[in-house]
Amino acid sequence: MPAKSNIQTLTHAGYACLQLSTHHGTAIVALQGAQLLSWVPNAQREVFWLSPTSRPEPAAIRGGVPICWPWFGKQGMPPGAMQHGPVRSLQWALDTVEADSADQVCITLSPCRRTPTYNALRQWAPHLHVSLRIALSERLVQTLETHNHGAQPFALTQALHSYFAVQDATQVLVHGLSSLCFEDKLFGSTVSLQPGVFQLDTACDRIYAQNAPGSAHHYTLEDGLAQRRIHIHTQGSHSLVVWNPGEEQARNMADVPDGAWRNFLCLEATNAGQDVVQLPPGGRHRLTQSLAVERHPTPATPGP
């Protein structure tokens, strides 16, 4: 690995990781799944929730930003397919350091090909190549790029499955969803219209479909108890998943401790539901989320 003063190797929560550091804060990325585990902007709290009871590798890590690829859930796949695809359990390697300064560091990672677990990826998507670019400055930007090297098109679904840390999931507000249709996975995939600002009241598993033109969209997670807003800008996506298991489902999840369901809300930049990327031979697609944290000293109040 290049000898860069603001990129270090370390063990975090039991996982081999890379730590990125700039004047603006630090981020920690697990080599398993290229999964972002932590982002702490200067003078701010941790942005992501990470389970203290996650199972050891190669089991999927609960929390941070898992990569769901090249399918989301088991959409379009046979019953034997792995939930959310195989890459979150694969070992990834550092490919490039694209920039290195006191203000910004950018790295690119891709799955290690010389490992036995890489065969799981070759079985399902032998002609796809995936890489993840992470840029840390005053913002944190993740870009998941897929390239189809094969002679046949591929129906790609995917997600950056972010677990945002919150004080109380039932008290936060999500802006940017008003008047969007959503598919409710907990109620037979029925389609409904979001009447205004989103606020969690029970378990939630929804795919929101964007109706705005273009592929760049903006959502805001407002946490009045933590006195902050997290701004989420997405590109290459026409959908957003909102997920929280709620109290009853969380009881059956070994890696979600008692009461911990209140400490996170998943807002996931996705291509899922009706938002399927038809990737032609030779085609490329980029799914990007750009995150920024804003201090917000006043309590959250419902709004548009």
Image (cartoon, rainbow, N blue to C red):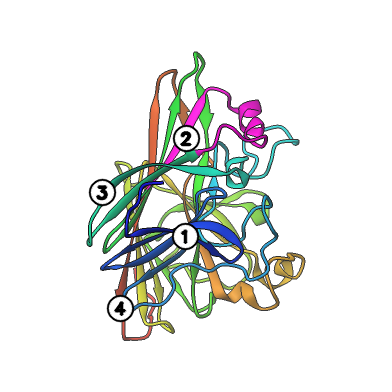
Q: Is residue 121 magenta?
A: yes
Give SS at disc 2: strand
Q: Magenta part of the protein: which range?
A: 111-133
Residue 75: quarter of image: top right
Residue type beneath disc 1:
Gln
Residue carrying label 1: 194
Report crowding for label 2: few under 14, some 14 to 19, many 20 or more residues within 10 A (C-alpha): some
Q: How many marks?
A: 4
Task: Tell me what residue is drawn at x 26 percent, y 64 percent.
Answer: 138
Residue 86: quarter of image: top right
Query: Alpha-carbon distance for marks 2 and 4?
Result: 34 Å
Report crowding for label 4: few under 14, some 14 to 19, many 20 or more residues within 10 A (C-alpha): some
| CB contact under 8 Å: marks 1 and 4 | no
Task: Tell me what residue is drawn at x 47 percent, y 46 percent.
Answer: 270
Q: Position of residue 103 (x, y in %)?
A: 22, 61
* First along the sequence among labels 3 and 2: 3
Query: Alpha-carbon distance for marks 1 and 4?
Result: 27 Å
Q: Position of residue 76 (x, y in %)?
A: 63, 33
Residue type beneath disc 4:
Arg
Residue carrying label 3: 99
Residue type beneath disc 3:
Ala
Residue type beneath disc 2:
Val
Residue carrying label 2: 130
Residue carrying label 4: 295
* First along the sequence among labels 2 and 4: 2
